Amino acid sequence: MSRSRRARRCLPRAVARACMSLAILLAAAAIGRSQDHSSPPAEAGPDFASLLGMIGVSDDDLADLAAIEADIDSRQAALIGRILYRLEQLDLDQLDVQASRSGGEHAERPGETGDFPAGALVGYRGTAISAEKLSLPSGADPKPATLYRCRIDMAAGGPLVVFSADVPKAWLTADRAAEMSEPVALRGVLLRSASDAASEPAVVLTNRFQWFPNKGVPAGTLWLASRGFDAALLDDVRQGRPLAKPDESREAAAFYRMLDELAAASPKELTHLACEAVAEAAANWASRAKSAGREADRLADRLKTSSGEDREALQRRAAALRREQSMAANVAERAEHGLSSVWPMFLEPEESAGQFFVIEGVARRAVRILADQPLAGLTHYYELDVFPPDSQNLPVVCCVARLPRGFPTGDVIREPVQVAGVFFKRWAYARRPGADSTSDRRLPARLAPPLVLAAEPVWLPRAAPGDAGRGLWAGAMLLVAIGVSGLLFARRARRDRLARRQRARYDAPLDDLARLP
């Protein structure tokens, strides 16, 4: 076949391939525009309202849901379940509803709300002042597992009623529910606009709230929330388990967003905050130790007269009190060096989550990890296995956004570091075989070490080889000097003894002279 004929036959294929490539690029561009986080809700609203119409949810249905006060029938529960399912598919967490990093103000965002029709997607910010759990009928399919009716005070505009499938766990505690004042952000579907009934507030249905607490949470969580971190994500963190995959829960989102916020902070600021937490922790544990000591004294008296199951229960409680006192002693000992004890992270992970910690130890491993959920400023991070003096040869895994310049990486390193960050969870993972030849071979096959997130470790100096050699020679010379001094002292002592004997010969009484040789 001639070259020109082959060229003519290949031309249509080339044109077809080019057209296909162009179609793919246009489709990708369309998808990108549809997922553009900067587009206002007013553009997305009518589209979602049309989607609701396609699944059989009418404006009358939305008005019916907006009128719910307490009792929900099976039909309403099924409608709510269908709408929430569609909202979950949109992945509203990826939309730009996080608070700005400007001092933790969570006012309503201008342009996000307005006179939208029922069925539109809208976004609000405000303060949650109440959350009531509603009872759901049995038999509805689909239906949410839970549903809460919340009231929101907005900085601009009137009150807002929100039906949510979930609320932060902290809201359900009696102390917090008594005087709720929780800064929140949300994005959901508008069931009723405030303009539809002048005397009634607007009503919104959503999957969840974004929560920015300003009190009543650990210091690390409080600092993160002030910078726009959604503290409600921490409800999905599971202690003592492997890190959840992005499609399993929001734990992965909590991990990456927390690490991204820490990466934007300076290591000096984090170290300062962590050192303040060291002093506070020492004071808290000292108070706990005193209370534990008083209770232990009372238990000792009861143990003298107890028996059977009651005695076993008292013994278990006494053992817990002794452990608490030991932990307090360890916290106090590390605090004297300006450092955190790792014992609370190991033994009380639930209570320690979200707290600042500052630890020092030897990093025996440092590897680069690509992010599963890359953010704008975080495409990768580094994982360090740090062994502090009080960890009993167990690692503390530190995930940091970056390493100091020149810091070595690999599975077998030995570098002294200081890490100031926030405790995330106890992370269960299978022990890496052969990854660290210096680690204790008696460790279990599956570990659950603490996981701390930080911006950057501080690379601590260590003695240079020349300094170590000079120190060795100095020590040897000191030993020689001590030995020579000992010999000289022994010789002098022997001379003194001989002199005293000779003197005794001449100072003896006269009647003893005959006995002398």
Image (cartoon, grey):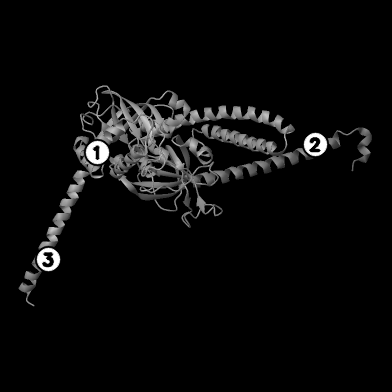
Give me the C-alpha separation between circle 1 and circle 3.
Answer: 49 Å
Where residue 376 appears, as percent x and y from the top left, is 28, 42
Q: Nearer the viewer, mark 2 or mark 1?
A: 1
Residue 482 quadrant? top right
Residue 9 quadrant? bottom left
Callout 3: 10 Å neighbours few (<14), some, many (20+)?
Answer: few
Residue 74 vs 213, above or below: the answer is: below
Disc sitting over residue 13 in the figure? 3
* Closer to us: 262 or 485: 262
The answer to whether residue 63 is left or right of residue 484 is left
Q: Looking at the image, is mark 1 or mark 3 earlier in the sequence?
A: 3
Where residue 20 appears, as percent x and y from the top left, is 15, 59
Q: Secondary structure at mark 1?
A: loop
Q: Looking at the image, is mark 2 or mark 1 earlier in the sequence?
A: 1
Amino acid type, label 3 = Arg
| Residue 97 visible here | no
Where residue 407 appears, as percent x and y from the top left, is 38, 47
Give me the C-alpha separation between circle 2 and circle 1.
Answer: 120 Å
Q: Quadrant of the N terminus?
A: bottom left
Q: Which residue is mark 2?
A: 500
* Closer to us: 267 or 508: 267
Residue 72 quadrant? top left
The answer to whether residue 70 is left or right of residue 14 is right
Q: Which residue is mark 1?
A: 58
